[in-house]
Image: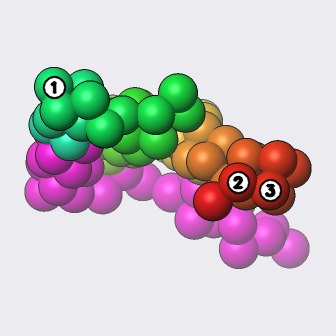
């Protein structure tokens, strides 16, 4: 019996609408990063860039052709792992 996680992760890409939403989110985080650098409010740990990269990876996964389910799954897993790195400083270093 295949697992539900593998069914979801390695499913057919959702299409251009979801990819457009992901890429739009990436543009928003790029704008936030540029704004925080221009105003000098950016920190050493820039979560904006991690979110930007996660959204781009997700957008790539959703914009692939329907027959590229495995490649989409790899991009989705990479995005999830990248986005989980935002939680590392909070749990290990005790910083918010």
Q: Quadrant of the C terminus?
A: bottom right
- Distance from label 3 to label 2 (Cα)? 4 Å
Q: What element does badge 3 sit on?
A: loop
Q: Residue at x 16, y 46 (%)?
A: 28
Is residue 11 located in the magenta-colored stretch of the structure?
yes
Compared with 55, 49 (above or below) is above
Q: What element does badge 1 sit on?
A: helix
- Distance from label 3 to label 1 (Cα)? 28 Å
The disc placed on residue 51 is none
**Residue 32: image location, x then y, percent:** 20, 42
Are the residues tagged 3 and 1 within 8 Å (C-beta)? no
Can see residue 67?
Answer: no
* Residue 18 location, quadrant: bottom left
Q: Nearer the viewer, residue 56 or 16?
A: 56
Q: Residue at x 60, y 38 (%)?
A: 82
- Distance from label 1 to label 2 (Cα)? 24 Å
Is residue 44 located in the magenta-colored stretch of the structure?
no
* Residue 67 location, quadrant: top left
Q: What element does badge 2 sit on?
A: loop
**Residue 79: image location, x then y, percent:** 53, 41
Q: Which residue is mark 1?
A: 38
Q: Residue at x 51, y 57 (%)?
A: 11
Q: Earlier in the sequence, mark 3 or mark 1?
A: 1
Q: Which residue is mark 3?
A: 94
Q: Earlier in the sequence, mark 1 or mark 2?
A: 1
Q: Residues within 10 Å of mark 2 (few under 14, many from 20)?
A: few
Please, what is the dominant secondary structure of the magenta stretch? helix
* Residue 14 location, quadrant: bottom left
Q: Which residue is mark 2?
A: 95
**Residue 6: image location, x then y, percent:** 70, 59
- Residues in magenta? 1-29
Task: Say whether residue 91 is left or right of residue 37.
Answer: right
């Amino acid at each position: 019996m295949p697992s539900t996680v593998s069914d979801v992760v390695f499913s057919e890409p959702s299409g251009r609408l979801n990819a457009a939403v992901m890429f739009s989110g990436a543009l928003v985080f790029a704008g936030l990063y540029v704004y925080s650098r221009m105003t000098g409010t950016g920190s050493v740990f820039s979560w904006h860039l991690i979110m930007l990269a996660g959204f781009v990876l997700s957008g790539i996964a959703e914009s692939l052709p329907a027959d590229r389910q495995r490649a989409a799954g790899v991009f989705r897993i990479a995005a999830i792992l990248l986005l989980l790195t935002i939680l590392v400083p909070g749990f290990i270093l005790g910083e918010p």
